[in-house]
Image (cartoon, helix red, strand yellow):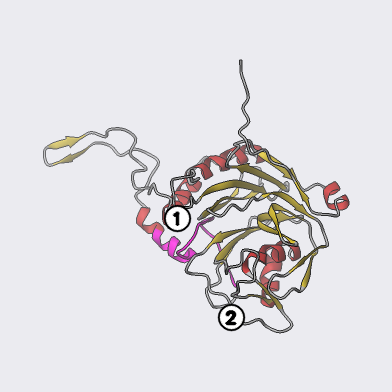
Amino acid sequence: MCTSLSLEVLDGSKFLARTMDFAFELNGRPTFLPEQYQWISSYDKKAYVADYAIVGTGAKYGNNYMVADGFNEYGLSAAELYFANAAKYEKKPVEGEINLVAEEFILWALGNNKSIEDLKENLKKVHLIESDRGVMQANQPLHWIFSDATGATYILEPEGNGLTLQEDKVGVLTNTPDYNWHKTNLANYLGAQTTNFGAKKFGNQEVIPLGQNGTFRLPGGYTAVDRFVRTAFIREVTETPKDNQQAVNTILHMLDSVTIPKGVNIKGNGEASYTQYQTVLDLTNLVMYFVPYDNRTVYSVKMTNDLIKNQKEPKEFPVKMEQDFQTLN
C-alpha cells in the first residue's frame, strides 16, 4: 500500500512525492549513493556500476543499499509501489542482457539514466526475473512511477508484456488494480466537487443542506482505489503552490489525506500496515524532503556539487525517531 503523486508549481519546479505504506519495517533513511557506486545483483551476482549519484530512501541489505524512492543528479526520479497479484515477471533470464529482481530495479534506473527518454531506450535491455533470490527472499510484486526534471511522468507496470512506459496523465499512482483501471474508475466520481450543493425539494419537502457537502462522493477508506480517487481529486483542486518551499508544505498536506496511522489497516497475520514515511522530491532543486512516522519534523537532503564530487562512499543521514516539539512558553 502506497500513494504517489507528481506536481508542477507556479515557479516551474517539478516534484514527485509518495507515502511508503508497508507492514515489514523497511528502516529506510535518507541516503546518498555516489557516482560509480557498485552493487551486486541478488539474482545472478553480477556487478553493476551506477554512473550517476543518487539521493533517496535507502537501507542496506547484505552488501547492497536498496532504494525505494529517490532521484539522481540529473533529476530523474522514481518510486516503487506494491502491485500485488498483478506484477508478472519473466521466468528465465536473457543471456547477455541485464537480469534483475524487482527491488533492484530503481538502482539500475536512477544509476544509469538521465531522463525519461533515456529510460525508454535503455529499458530494451533490462529484464525483471521472477525469483526469491532478492534481499527480502521472496518475489516482490512492484510497479513504478518515474518523473524527470522536465516534469514528464510515466508508469511502468510489468504485466507479462515486457517493460514499457505509459504516460501518467493523472499524476497519481497507488496499488492494484493497474493504472488503466484506476483511470477508468475516475468516471464514477465526476459528481465530486469543491462547492456545496444547495437545497432541493423532494415532493413538497424542501431539504436544507446540513453543512459542507460538495465532496460527499469522495471515498474515505485506505484501499488503493479509494486513495487513487481521493488523491486525484485533491491534486486537481488544491491551490497551486507559488514556489518550491510552499510546494513542500502543500504536498505534505495532500499526502496526509492518504497517510495511514498504525493500527488502522491490519494484515491477515496481525501486522499493521502503515505509512512508515513520506517523501517529497524536488526534481528542479535536487532536494529530498523526508518525514518519518515517529517524528513529523521535515528533514531535507540536497544533492550538492560538493556531495557529488567529494563523497565517494554511501552516506546515510541520521533521522530522529522521537517527536520533536517547539515550546512556546
Q: Residue at x 69, y 54 (%)?
A: 59
Q: Residues within 10 Å of mark 2 (few under 14, many from 20)?
A: few
- Look at label 1 and name its amino acid: Lys
Whether pointer 1 and pointer 2 mark residues with C-beta atoms closer than 8 Å, the reply is no
Give the labeled residue for mark 2.
Answer: 91
Viewer-side residue, 146 vs 88: 88
Q: Position of residue 289 (x, y in %)?
A: 66, 43
In this picture, residue 8 sits left or right of residue 233: right
Q: Position of residue 253 (x, y in %)?
A: 53, 40
Magenta region, residue range: 163-185
In this picture, residue 23 sits left or right of residue 122: left
Q: Residue at x 48, y 52 (%)?
A: 271
Q: Is residue 254 above or below residue 182?
A: above
Residue 267: mark? 1
**Label 1 or label 2, whichever comes before in sequence order:** 2
Viewer-side residue, 249 vs 243: 249
Per the image, is 255 magenta? no
Q: Position of residue 224 (x, y in %)?
A: 45, 56
In this picture, residue 269 sits left or right of residue 123: left
Element assignment for label 2: loop
